[in-house]
Amino acid sequence: MNALHQYLFDTYRAARLGEPLPPEPGTHDVAVLRAVRDRRRFERVPAGRRAHGTVRAALRRWRRPTA
């Protein structure tokens, strides 16, 4: 059973019992991704690492010519 089947079963059950309908699949995906990003940024600060710009800084170090 995939997420769509489960959603259809839950919608049917909620309609029969007079409960509010469940959210559609994928409704909160963006909020979850933002929460994961924010959590990772937060965990970097107590560990003593930079919270922003780490990818760009690494690319600059990699692309910088050595003399």
Image (cartoon, rainbow, N blue to C red):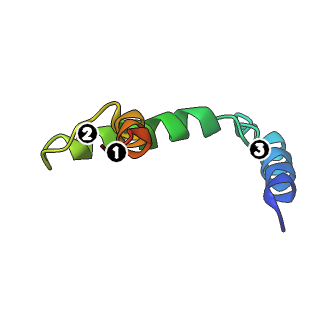
Q: Amino acid at mark 3?
A: Ala
- Mark 2: secondary structure: helix
**Pointer 3 or 2: first along the chain:** 3
For marks 3 and 2, give the one nearer the viewer: 2
Q: CA distance from mark 2 to mark 1?
A: 5 Å
Q: Which residue corresponds to the image point at 48% horizontal and 34% vertical from the top-left?
A: 34
Residue that numbered label 1 is attached to: 40
Q: Position of residue 43 (x, y in %)?
A: 24, 46
- Mark 3: secondary structure: helix
Q: Amino acid at mark 2?
A: Phe
How many residues crowd mark 2 within 10 Å: few (<14), some (14–19), many (20+)?
few
Q: Which residue corresponds to the image point at 23% horizontal and 45% vertical from the top-left?
A: 44
Residue that numbered label 2 is attached to: 42
Q: CA distance from mark 3 to mark 2?
A: 38 Å
Marks 2,1: beta carbons within 8 A: yes
How many residues crowd mark 1 within 10 Å: few (<14), some (14–19), many (20+)?
few
**Pointer 3 or 1: first along the chain:** 3
Q: Amino acid at mark 1?
A: Arg
Left or right of 34, for residue 6 = right
- Mark 1: secondary structure: helix
Q: Position of residue 12 (x, y in %)?
A: 86, 48
Q: Position of residue 21 (x, y in %)?
A: 74, 36
